[in-house]
Structures are given as C-alpha cells and as structure tokens.
Amino acid sequence: MKALIVDDSPTNTRLLQQLVSMVDGCETTVFTDPLLVLETLPRSDYDIALIDYMMPGLDGIGLIGRIRQMPHLADIPLVMVTTSDERAVRHMALNAGATDFLTKPIDPIELRSRVRNLLALRGAQKQLQARNQLLAQDLAAREGEIVLCLSRAAEYRDPETGAHILRMAKYCRVIGEALGLDALSCTTLYLAAQMHDIGKIGVSDGILLKSGGYTPEERRIMEMHTVYGHRILQGSNSELIRMASEIARSHHERWDGTGYPDGLGGESIPLGSRIAAVADVFDALTSVRPYKPAWSADKARQYLADNSGSQFDPACVTAFVSRWPEVLAIHSEGHPPLALAS
C-alpha cells in the first residue's frame, strides 16, 4: 500500500511518515508544497492520503477537491489533518471529498488505527474492482462467442458472407475511430457490425443466391432480411446485442429517408447503422458478386462521395475517406490486389 503525506511543516511530515510507515510496512511519499504535489499526481498512484488543512498556496480543502477530480484517485481515502475542530471547516472538507479527520496534536495510536482501517477498506475496494473487471472481461468474451456463432450461421447460407462480414466490421471500426468514438464503443461497433446480415438466414436460397436481378416481389422479400435480423437480436440487455439489433434493421436506411425498412432519415438513423451503411456498400461494390464484377477501390470511393448527403451520412463518408490507407490495407486482406483507378 502507498500513502501520500502533504504538510508544509517538515517536522509534521517526518512524524506522519514515521507513524504511517509502521502500519503494515506502508510506503510513504512526502510533499511540503501542495502545488508541487499537484504536478505529480497525474503520474502517481496512492491508496491513502493524509493532507494538512492550513498550507500556503493551496489549503487542504482545495487540494482534496483537486484530487477527487482525478479519475485514478477519485476513490482513495483522504484524511484531513487539522488543528481546527470547527464544524464549518469539517463540513467544507466533507463537501470537497474528505473521508476522515485527524486533529493535531496527533495521537499515534489513533492515527495508526485509522490508517490501518482505511487501508483495509481500500484493499477490499481494489479487490472488488479487480473482480468486476474480470467479470466484465468474461462477459465480453461470451458476447464475442455469440457473435462468432451467429456469424457462422449466416456464413453457412452464403459463402461470401464470412469474408464480407469481417472486412465490413473492420471498416466500421475505422470509421468509428475517425469519428472520435472511444475504444470500447469502437470494439462494440466492430462486433455488432458482424451481425448486420444475420437476417439473411430467413431468406430462401432461391432468392439469396440468385445470380440475376430481382423481381419487385423478390426484392421485397430480400429486403425483409433487415427485419428478420432485428427480430433475432431484439430484446437483449447487452449493449453489444442492442447495437447489433439496430444495425441489422437500419443499415439499409438512407440519409435522405428513402431507404428501408422504416424510411428513417438523417440522425434518426442510429449512428452504428449510418456507419455500417458506408462500410457495407463499399465492401459490396469492391467484391465480386454473381451479378457483377468487383469495382476498383477508387471507383467505390467516388460512389460514396457522389452519394454523400443522399444515401450516406456525410460525416461517416468523410471519416472513412480520412483513413484511406487503413481502408486499402483492410481491402487487400480479403481481395486480390486491385488497380486504384476505374
């Protein structure tokens, strides 16, 4: 365990350091300047802090408030050491985030007992955090297995689907990163996007694998894969499955409101679906299909640009193009090299 001691009196810091070090060999770091300690805190980690109230430059209440604003230290016990037992001072300290108080002159037995108890509490808190992290990792792994199983189910229906879903999901992650989504959101998007066409398992082979164009009735049936996918995935409390359900239903919606199945437009289309629309169309255009040859990457890029603001969210197209070298690298993983010009 590591303890931080901040007091502008060298005599007081030596006493506190000696007493705290006696608690189960606790390591101590001492500062006499509260402004200096602020410079080091972003790079430091502690399990408890003992902070004097009256200090030049920044008093203990102000320092406690600043520490509580730092996410990695927001939960550690903060003990204010003061000569004052005025209720107003204690109230201000509590409002700033103080956990406990010690009154000067320091009672060695009281200090050691309080520090020992607070460190035990901190230890239990860290164990709980570690356990929650393991549970979260286990849940993420299980959700990943669900994605894999559902994706395999779609792959059995359409041999092209397996390679397509991985490339398309990688494109989605690239777009999410370019839009500034955090790492967790990008990972969720990457996994959810892999289930965008899961509803195709509800479409008959005669339509799904048809090499020619669709009749109006066949197209209507084919478009139902969005609704089937939503029905398969809906109702889960999982953020991943919830996003996958949205993407499955809405990745064929258009920015101008003329898409399907619900005719949504603009930002009423979920962001994940707007991202998936760009990724899905780009990969479909640059892939061989029974009814068409593969387009070049540049030709497909031009199609996205030409339809930005009508079929596609302009921000998603801009984000996609801004990461063009990464797009080409993903493209080359699953296709033979293509010329960049049409």
Image (tube, helix red, strand yellow):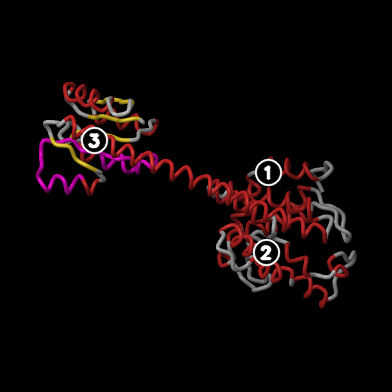
**Disc nearest the viewer among 3 and 2:** 3
**Disc nearest the viewer among 2 and 1:** 2
* Amino acid found under the numbered disc labelled 2: Ala
Picture quadrant of residue 219: bottom right
Location of residue 60 in the rendering, given as x and y in whole percent from the top left corner: 20, 37
At label 1, counting other C-alpha atoms closer than 10 Å, the crowd grade (few under 14, some 14-19, many 20 or more) is: some
Location of residue 33 in the rendering, given as x and y in whole percent from the top left corner: 23, 27
Q: Which residue is mark 3?
A: 113
* Disc 3/disc 1 C-alpha distance (Å): 61 Å
Q: Which residue is mark 2?
A: 248
Q: Name the residue: 68% across, 70% down.
A: 259
Number of callouts: 3
Q: Which residue is mark 1?
A: 324
Location of residue 159 in the rendering, given as x and y in whole percent from the top left corner: 84, 56
Q: Earlier in the sequence, mark 2 or mark 1?
A: 2
As drawn, the label of residue 123 is none
User: Which element is circle 2 on?
Assistant: helix
At label 3, counting other C-alpha atoms closer than 10 Å, the crowd grade (few under 14, some 14-19, many 20 or more) is: few
Q: Is residue 285 left or right of residue 131?
A: right
* Amino acid found under the numbered disc labelled 3: Ser
Magenta stretch contains residue 123: no
